[in-house]
Amino acid sequence: MVWWFYVPNIVFGEDALTELEQISGKKAFIVTDRVINSLGLAEKVCRILTERQWEAAIWDGVEPDPKVSTVKAAAEAIKMFGADWIIAVGGGSVMDTAKAAWVLYEKPDVELHALTPFDELGLRKKAKLICIPTTTGTGSEATKAIVIRDDETGRKFATINPELTPDIAILDPEFVVGLPRNLTAYTGMDALTHAVEGYVSVWKNDFSDGCSLQAVKMIFEWLPKSVDNLTDLESREKMLIAACLAGMAFGNSQAALAHSLGHSMGSVLRTHHGMSVGMALPYTIEFNCRGKENEEAAKQYSELARLIGITGKKPETVSLKFAGAVRELMKKIGSPQSFKEAGVKKKDFNAGLENMVDFAMMDTSLTMNPRNIDSEEIRKMYRYMYDGTVIDF
C-alpha cells in the first residue's frame, strides 16, 4: 500500500523568528486574535517584514473555536489585501482559521464542510502559509487538518487535506514564554492526546510512530516543568518541539475517540479543546485496551507505558497503569479529570448529553479508533466522565 507523510519545513530554537528574513515576497497578511495582538507578537512579525520593505497587515478577528463565518471574513480580508504569504500567529484556532481562509482565498467556491483528503485544491498559486504557534499543544503548524465550527448548530467538524500542510512552521520559545498556567496545562494535554491517539489510530504507520514515541516521552518529562515555571525557555522550547512532533504524528495517522468526545464537549458545553480531549484521554485508554479482542491496542498502549517506566507482563494491565499515569500527570499540572472537576453543572451536562452523543457519533475521528463504539457506550462514557469513574466496560 502506498502511503504519504506530510510535514512542513520546521525552524526551531531561540531566534527562530529570524527565518522571516530569508523568505521572498511582497505582501504578508498576518492572522491572529485580539489577545495575541495585544501582547505585541503579531507586531513583532510585522516589524521584521516591514523593515525589509514588505507590505504587511494584521487581522485579529479570530475567536476561540472559529466559526465558518469567521473564516469567510478572514478570507475576504486577505482577498482585499492581496497577500502572497499568509502568516498565522497564535494557537490552534488562529492556525485553523488561517488554513481555512487560505483555501477560500484561493478557491472561494469550496464548501469547507465538504472538503475531503482527496480533493485537488491547487493551493499556492496566490499565497503560501507560515504558522507561528503561541501555545505548546495543538500541533496545527505541522498538520494538514482544520477544525471549524458550524454557525447554526455549533458542531465542530474536522477535515484534512494534504495541501493544508503549512509551508513553514516557526517554533520560537519566546512566543510561548508567559503562557498562563492553565493554558500551558490544557495545551500540553492536547499534545499528549495527539501523540497517544496517533500511536493507536488504525491509520498509524512507522513514521508517525516515531514521532508519537518521542513526543510522549518528552511531554511526561517537560510538561510539569513547563507548568511550574512559566518563563523557563528550555521547557518551553522542549514542549514546542513535543507538540510539533505530536502534530506530525496524528496529522499523518489521525486522531481517535478522545477527539470525538472532546470536539463534542467543546461544541455543546464550550469547554476548552485541550482540556476536553485531555480529560477524555485516560477514559478512552481504559475503554480501548479491555478484552481479548482489543489485545493489539493494549499492546500499543503498553509500549507507550514502558517509555515512562511502567512495567508488567499483561498488556491490558500495563495499559490501565498507563491511563493511571495520565491521570497523575493531569493532577500534577491541574488539568481537570472530570466534568465535575471542570466546574460543569450537572443540569448543564444533562441538558447537553444527547447533543454530545450525537455530535460524537458524527465526528470523523471516531472511524480511526482501534475499538468500535456505539452511541450507548458513548453516553455511558460521558456519564463516567462526569464523576471521574474509571471505565470498566
Image (tube, rainbow, N blue to C red):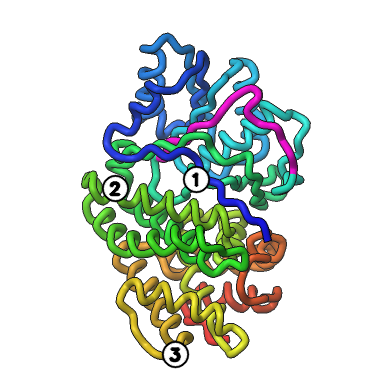
User: Which sits earlier in the primary sequence, circle 3 or circle 1?
Assistant: 1
Magenta: main secondary structure: loop
Cα distance in 3D space between marks 3 and 1: 35 Å
Mark 3 or mark 2, which is nearer to you? 3
The x and y percentages for residue 109 are: 78, 31
Q: Name the residue carrying label 1.
A: 142
Q: Position of residue 363 (x, y in %)?
A: 67, 60
Residue at the (38%, 54%) spot, across then down: 242
| Mark 2 neighbour class, 10 Å CA radius: few under 14, some 14 to 19, many 20 or more | many
Per the image, the residue denoted by label 2 is 236
Q: Position of residue 351 (x, y in %)?
A: 64, 65
Element type at marker 3?
Answer: loop
Identify which residue is drawn at 64% across, 20% down.
79
Which stretch appears magenta? 119-133
Identify residue type, mark 1: Ala
Q: Quadrant of residue 69?
A: top right
Q: Residues within 10 Å of mark 3 (few under 14, many from 20)?
A: few
